[in-house]
Image (tube, rainbow, N blue to C red):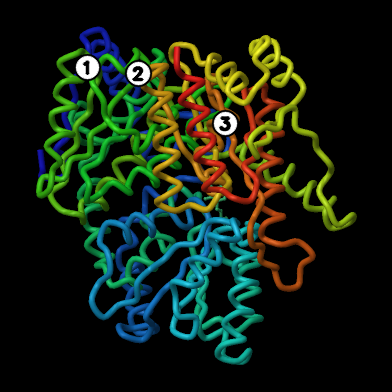
Amino acid sequence: MNHLNRQTYALPDDLVAAVRASLRAWYESGNVHRLWARDATLWTGTDEGGWLGWLGIIEDRRESETYLRAIAEEVGPARFTHALLLGMGGSSLCPEVVAGTFGRQAGYPELYVLDSTDPAHVKGIEQRVDLADTLFIVSSKSGTTLEPNMFTQYFYDRVGQVVGADKAGSRFIAITDPDSTLQQLAERLGFRRVFHGLPSIGGRYSALSTFGLVPTAIMGVDALALLDRAAEMARACASCVPIEENPGVTLGTILGILAARGRDKVTIVASPDIRRFGAWLEQLLAESTGKTGRGLIPVDREALGPPDLYGADRLFVYLRMVSGPDRSQDAALDALERAGQPVVRISLTDPYDLGAELFRWEIATAVAGSILGVNPFDQPDVEASKVAARTLTAVYEQTGSLPPEAPFLQERGIALFSDQRNAAALTEAAGRDRSLVGYLRAHLNRLQSSNYFAILAYIEMNDAHEDVLGLLRHAVRDAKRTATCVGFGPRYLHSTGQTYKGGPNTGVFLQITCDDAIDLPVPGQRFSFGMVKAAQARGDFQVLTERHRRALRVHLGSDVEAGLATLHTAFQQALRR
Ligand SMILES: O=P(O)(O)OC[C@H]1O[C@H](O)[C@H](O)[C@@H](O)[C@@H]1O
């Protein structure tokens, strides 16, 4: 066992037997060899073979060295004070994890990531950077994603106003697949450089390619060191390694086998230094496996509690930083293990071990996808929300407003919306108490054992809002003993949104929207940031309800803080027995 391969698991006996049986079957069928041979029949036998380019990324070290040297020469230390990455999902989450884990490096730009259309969020980020001294990294594999295109239009215009239109392009680079529309845009606007991704690697598997490594190098973190740790992990996951010692395959087998037996809430626990890793992992697990009514539900950043808070639908994964463990996490995980909950433990010696984790989890996800019988490389239900949002945006462009909608309750500045089916079910369950508290109680009472509760918040993503949403989720977890998730829109649409719509129909959703106190125009477009965010929220809600999900939308008005405070009070009353 090498130092990267410190992974142990403690499972109830029946699950150990099932995991071992599956590993044996994989060994007998030569499945690890088939995986490395990119054999699509390991999954659904469609186009999977074309999406496994990430398996070879380690072999391309020399190529990585070349572009990392180019970026060093291009933007070098001390040339920019800030770097602002504009991108969604797989094009933004790895850089966000690296920035959050390593922090600012002396002499290098501080990296921020913009992945929200919330106008207050966009403005807040703009105010944190020095526009004249910022390198903008437009990151989009396809080049057609709405959000990065809007961000680029906005910031290219803003930078032009500050440094002159002819110099704006020199502050921009792009990371995109060859010949994408983003590449064409970059050429037209005179970006200083375009870095290419590999078309055989999908967004969420692109962390160890240009999409993860270029921003890593720009912030002054040793990208090759990450890649080298990943290479060690790749060797540990090779087909010649005895299967029970293969860390990625074993982990993937545990994920797949336990999910197939109802333990599909993969509860991610990470040491404080690497707590951001879960944001990347969520997307990988949820988008890859959550489809055709099957899949994993990642649960990130839910506080740990005593064993009696958890049902039989959990798997705990503990990523523990040896150099800085949190003793209360250690104690909580020990107690869970003693209580018979399944726990996988992974040790990291330093933050560069994240490189190994990226690869371990990619292999594990591919294996889990095979066991669950899904294609882990597509995201069919993400597209549905995009289509719905596009249709609503088109209506706005033609008429100047979104289609009218009517709340079924208005109280204390909060309005409740849903589709007819959900509204009728909630009204019936609320009985005579047709108040905010009555409806919330009715909605939360829909949670049955092994269900999960997800808050989908289309508000500014900041610490204060995260704190209040944390209070809401934990109140539900404690009262109902169910798993809870929190996602900010539109960010989660490119991540966990896939499994919420396409995975098991076990979620109870609370969407939170608001009126934007300020809005921002998008240069050259009729729509604004606020309008697009509203269309994205409505489009996603529509798709959730079309998929017969149990969903309620709470609209807060323009004073988000006051609205959240009212909602919190109402939650406490609704959960009181
Ligand atoms: O990199 P892009 O092409 O802009 O894609 C960004 C994201 O968009 C979509 O929503 C996909 O579901 C994600 O998997 C992807 O990472």
> Which one is nearer the viewer's eye here, 337 or 305?
305
Say whether marks 1 and 2 touch (CB < 8 Å).
yes
- Whether residue 510 is visible, yes or no, is yes
Q: Secondary structure at mark 3?
A: strand
Q: Secondary structure at mark 1?
A: loop
Q: Amino acid at mark 3?
A: Leu
For residue 510, which numbered disc appears in the image?
3
Mark 1 to mark 3 CA distance (whole Å):
33 Å
Say whether marks 3 and 2 touch (CB < 8 Å).
no
Tell me which numbered mark, 1 or 3, is placed earlier along the sequence: 1
Which quadrant is the C terminus positioned in? Answer: top left
For residue 11, which numbered disc appears in the image?
1
Mark 1 to mark 2 CA distance (whole Å):
10 Å
Residue at (61%, 85%) from the top-left corner?
160
The quadrant in which residue 388 appears is: top right
Question: Pointer 2: what residue?
Answer: 258
Q: Amino acid at mark 2?
A: Leu
- Image location of residue 100, percent across then percent down: 31, 57
Q: Secondary structure at mark 2?
A: helix
Determine the residue located farthest toward the top in the rendered image. 14
> Which one is nearer the viewer's eye here, 499 or 188?
499
Tell me which numbered mark, 3 or 2, is placed earlier along the sequence: 2
Mark 3 to mark 2 CA distance (whole Å):
27 Å
Q: Amino acid at mark 1?
A: Leu
Badge 1: few (under 14), some or many (20 or more) residues near its Cα, within 10 Å? some
Q: Is residue 574 above or below residue 502?
A: above
Badge 2: few (under 14), some or many (20 or more) residues near its Cα, within 10 Å? many
Which quadrant is the N terminus positioned in? Answer: top left
The quadrant in which residue 105 appears is: bottom left
